[in-house]
Amino acid sequence: MMNEMPKKMTRKPVVAGQFYTASEALLKKEIARFAGQKKEAKSVLGVVSPHAGYVYSGSVAGEVLSSIKPKPAYIILGPNHTGFGKPFGMDTDRSWKTPLGEIAIDSIFAESILSHSEYIKKDSACHDREHSIEVQLPFLQYFNKNFTFVPITISYADKQTYKNIGKEIARAIKDSKENVTIIASSDMTHYEGQEPAKKKDMMAIEKILALDVDGFLATVEKHNISMCGFAPTAVMMEACIELGAKTAELIKYNTSGDTSGDYSSVVGYAGIVIY
């Protein structure tokens, strides 16, 4: 009797039907509504993109992700809201499914990153219930029909750890010669009034636009900015700087209040590109 090949594991979506519609047809219509105005797309090194329910953050995600040229591969860095798994965990062995289809992990590139990093470890538990990376995928699928990706959760650590991980990722990209964009999945300030939230967010955004990793992290800490993905953003910034980034641009900013009409307690969303 011949040995059967092991079945490839698939990560099923955990927030389809909650953060975005679970219907393929309706999801395509939803994303089409959020896509930005037709304009020349930029080839970028890095992106900050939000990960809330599409009804709230979809217009920002759509605007920023439609403004970048598609790449054959993406590294998507997300915070670990669940606390499960390793602090810096990379899923390596599964495809990820959304209502728009399955996406393969670039296993060769993933192994390259692992070989360059003393921090990032193989782990699926940190991804099993985490939404921050998943919600980026349908947008990428809508704008880019054929790509692979590497998902990594980034938990809280010290400034030097973030910078070291960013440098490691940049070295892996250089050595493998991958044509890749790094996406940091993050919302901005959580559950403050519209004006205080916007004021805090603009202080953080100013440092991102200046490509000032130290200043960004210091600003988040000093002003107690509840940006859930500040760690992935710092790692992405450092990697982009190592890859030769020269400038950054704010594509769009809004808050949940701009959708709900309730400005008493909002969450901020920013779409930023680095090139």
Image (spheres, rainbow, N blue to C red):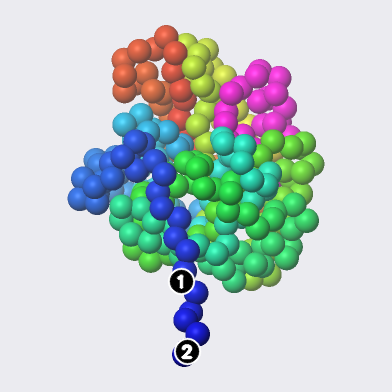
The residue beneath circle 2 is 2
In the rendered image of this protein, does residue 231 appear above or below residue 198?
below
Determine whether 191 is above or below 49 in the image.
Answer: above
* Residue at image location 41% in from the left, 44% down from the top: 14
Q: Residues within 10 Å of mark 1 (few under 14, many from 20)?
A: few
The answer to whether residue 148 shows anywhere in this view is no
Mark 1 or 2, closer to the camera: 2
Q: In the image, what residue type sits under mark 1?
A: Lys
Q: Where is residue 248 in the image (x, y as percent from the top left)?
A: 55, 42
- Residue farthest toward the bottom in the current orientation of the protein: 1
Q: Is the magenta stretch mostly helix, strand or loop?
A: helix
Residue 139 in the figure: left or right of residue 130: left
Quarter-wise, where is residue 235 in the image? top right
Q: What residue type is labelled 2?
A: Met
Q: State how far apart marks 1 and 2 are (Cα).
A: 15 Å
> Can you identify the residue that label 1 sits on?
7
Q: Please tell me which residue is depicted at 58% across the width and 53% down the height of the picture.
A: 124
Q: Quadrant of residue 70?
A: bottom left
The front one of 4 and 132 is 4
- Segment colored magenta: 214-238
Which residue is drawn at the image coordinates 47% and 90% (left, top)?
Answer: 1
Q: In this view, does 122 lie above or below 30?
A: below
Q: Which mark, by number, is residue 241?
A: none
Taking the spot 31% from the left edge, 23% from the top edge, the residue there is 259
**x, y percentage for residue 72?**
46, 66
Q: Percent x, y for residue 109?
A: 60, 67
Q: Label 1's element?
A: loop
Helix, strand or loop at label 2? It is loop
